Amino acid sequence: MTRFATVACAMSVAAATVSLVAQTPPPAAAPQAEVPWPVALGFRVASLEQERKVVDQVVLVGDEATFVAEIAQWTATTRWPVLFDEPRFAPSFIRAFKPARVVRRAASGTWPSARADREALLLRASSLRAATPSPGIVLTSVDDPSWVAGFALAAGRCLPMSFLEGDFGDEFGSMDASRFTELRRRTEAAAEASGLPWRGLGDAIETVVICRSIAPKCVPLLSPALRPQVNGLPQPIRAEDPLSTTDCLCRHDDGNRWGIASWIFGPRDRSAFVAMSSMFLGPSDTWLMSQYPNTQGWAPYLPQAAADRLEKTEIKTRVVTDHDMTLDAWRRQLMGGFDCGMLWLNSHGQMWEFALENNVMANANDVPLTNVPLELHLIHSFSLAQAGNPDSIGGRFIQQGVYCMHGSVFEPFLPAFTPPSLLAERVSYLAPLLVSARVYEGPFSLPWRTTGYGDPLHLAMIPARYGVQRIAPPDDSAPALRESAITALQSLKATPTAKAYASAMRDLVMAGEDALAVSLWSMSVQAGFADATALDALGPLFRARDLSAFVDAYTRCPTHRADDTTMLWHLAMGRLGTLQGDGGKRAVDVLARNLRGPDASIDFKLLAPTLERLLGRQGMREAGERAAVNMRDATVAAKLRALSR
C-alpha cells in the first residue's frame, strides 16, 4: 500500500485514469505488479460498471416482489436505480441522481412464503454475469430485511450470493469467540463455493459484504503475535476488549488479509437506498471538517492537503476548521441540512458525543441531516459500537442517510485511521473508499477496531469520470412523476381538494422538485388546504431554511416522522438569540413542547435563555415543569426542574 504515495505509482495510475475519463475500458497500462491491488480492484469495478449503461430513470416500487421483478429486468448492457416508494430515502437519492424521469411501477408477482422459494427466486433474478470477473461475494439472509441490499449488489455488481443463517448477534452487541469462528468459517466457505481464487490479495475475490444483522464487535481467540504492540498509548491494549468483526474477517491464521469485509443492516427501505447509492452515485462535492490542532501528532490529519488532492479529480471541496468548528458555528451549519455527497470529519469522544473546538462536546442530536446520500469517513472513537442505536453518533448518521461509512467499534487510537491526505490519494486513484480507509502497515494493520458500513466496492468518484454513461429512458407508457405532479398542480385552481393538494405535494417532493413544493405549500395555505400538505412540506421548507413556515407546517401535522423534530431544532438552534415578536414566541413554545431525547434537559438548557427572554421567567418555568411532568425518566425530570428554577 505504500506505493499509493510513490511517484512511480502516481504516474502509472494517472495514465490509466486518463483512459477511464476517455470512457475506454481500464487497460493494463502497466504490469499488474506495478499497480497496488486496491487500485487494480478499483479498475475492475470501473470496468464492470462501464459494461452496462445507466438508464436515466428511477423506478419506485411498493413491495419486495416488485423490487425483485424490476431488478430482474437489468441486462448485460443496462441497469437503473430501483427504490422503495417511501418519503425519506427515495427523495434523497432522487435529488442527488437527478434522473430524467421517476416512475412508479405497479405491483408485480407475489413474494414466496417459504424461505427456500425466496432464496431460489433471488438467485435466479441476480444471475447476470459479466466479462469482468466478480470482485467479491455477498452473504445475506432472506429472513433479514437487508437482503434487498445483498440482492441488489449481487445483481448490480455480478457477485456470487450465499445465504447466511444463524445467530451472529445484532448491531448493539459483541460476538464471542465461538460465534466469530463460525462466521469466519462460513465466510471462507462462501468464497470457496464461488469457484474463484480468493486466498490472496490481487486475485478474484477481494471483498465480502454481509447484508444482515451481525454484531459489529467480537472477541476472537488471537495469539499474542496478532495483537498490536505499541508504546506510549494512553491506555493498555487488553485481550478482553472487543475488536471489529469486519476487520477480523477475511484474514488467514497469521493475520494477513485475503480481502476486505463490510456490512449492511437495517430496514428494507434504507437497505435498498444504501445499495442503489453505492452503485449509482459518487460525490460531486466533499466537506472536510476538523477540530484537530496543528500540533505534533494531530497535524498529519489536517484536511487541507486532502482537499487539494480531491480538487484535481473535479470534486468540489469545502474545508471547515478552527473557529468554524465551535459548537455554535456547527449548529448554525445544521440549518437546512448538509448538501455534500461526502464528509470527512475529524473528532474524538465517546459513543454518544463528539468533540468540536476547545473539546466542547456535541451529541447525537447534533449529527447533521443529509439532503442527499452521504458517504462518511469519521475519525472518532466508538462511533459504530452500537451501530443500530440512533442515539449513538454512528447510528444517527446511518439513520439520517449515510450509505458508506468508515468508523470504529471501540477505542482505536488515532494512528489506526488513515490520514486524510493519504485517503484522498487512494480514492483519487479509484481505490474503493472502504478499502482505502484501512491501515495496511504497522501495528494497527493487525486485526483491530475500525469497521466499514456499506458496499466495500463503492468508488468515491463521480461515475461519469470513470466512464459510466447514461442513456435516455425507454419511450413507454409509464407515467413520469414530475409531469403528473405538475399536471395535478395546474388543475388545482379548477378542482381544489385536500386529496389533490396532498397528492401533488407528495409527488413533487418525491421527484426532487423542492422549489415547486414550497410554492405549493404557500398555495395550500391560501386555499385552506395546508393541513393536507403540511407533513410532506416539512422537508422542502427545512431545506429552504424557512423557520416560520416550517413551524406553521409542523404544528398542523397530526403525526410526525422520525426526522421532523430534528429538522425543527436544526432550523432553530442557530438563531435562538435573534428570535423575536409573536413568531419568535410561537417558535420557542413549539420547541419547548418538542424536546429531544434521550436527555431532554440538554435541549431545555439550550432553550431556557430564549424562553425567559420571550415568555418571561414564569413562562420559562412553566415550560420546564410541563416537560418534567411528561418525562418518564425521573433523572431527566429532575434536571428539567432544576434548570427551570
Image (cartoon, rainbow, N blue to C red):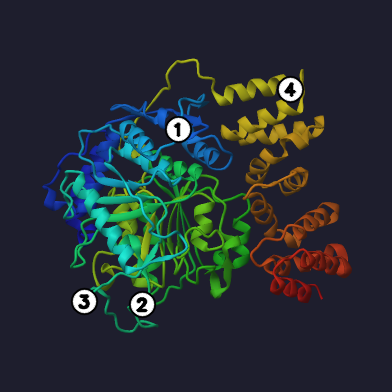
For residue 282, say whether it is visible. no
Q: Give the labeled residue for mark 1.
A: 111
Mark 1 and mark 3: span between their CA atoms?
Answer: 49 Å
| Dot 3: element | helix
Residue with the mark numbered 3: 225
10 Å neighbourhood of mark 4: few (<14), some, or many (≥20)? some
Image coordinates of residue 50 in percent, x first then y, are: 28, 34
Q: Look at mark 2 in the image and give the residue it sits on.
A: 240
- Mark 1 and mark 2 lie on one chain; the one further toward the N terminus is 1
The total of numbered circles placed on residues is 4
**Foreground disc of the pair 4, 1:** 1
- In this rendering, the answer to whether 564 lies above or below 396 is above
Q: Is residue 430 left or right of residue 388?
A: left
Q: Label 2's element?
A: loop
Q: Quadrant of the C terminus?
A: bottom right
Q: What is the x, y in percent for residue 440?
A: 25, 64
Left or right of residue 450, residue 364 in this image: right
Instruction: Name the front one of labels 1 and 2.
Output: 1
- Number of the label disc, if any, that sits on residue 492: 4
Mark 2 and mark 4: span between their CA atoms? 65 Å
Which amino acid does the dot numbered 3 rest on? Ala
Q: Of helix, strand and loop, which one carries label 4?
A: loop
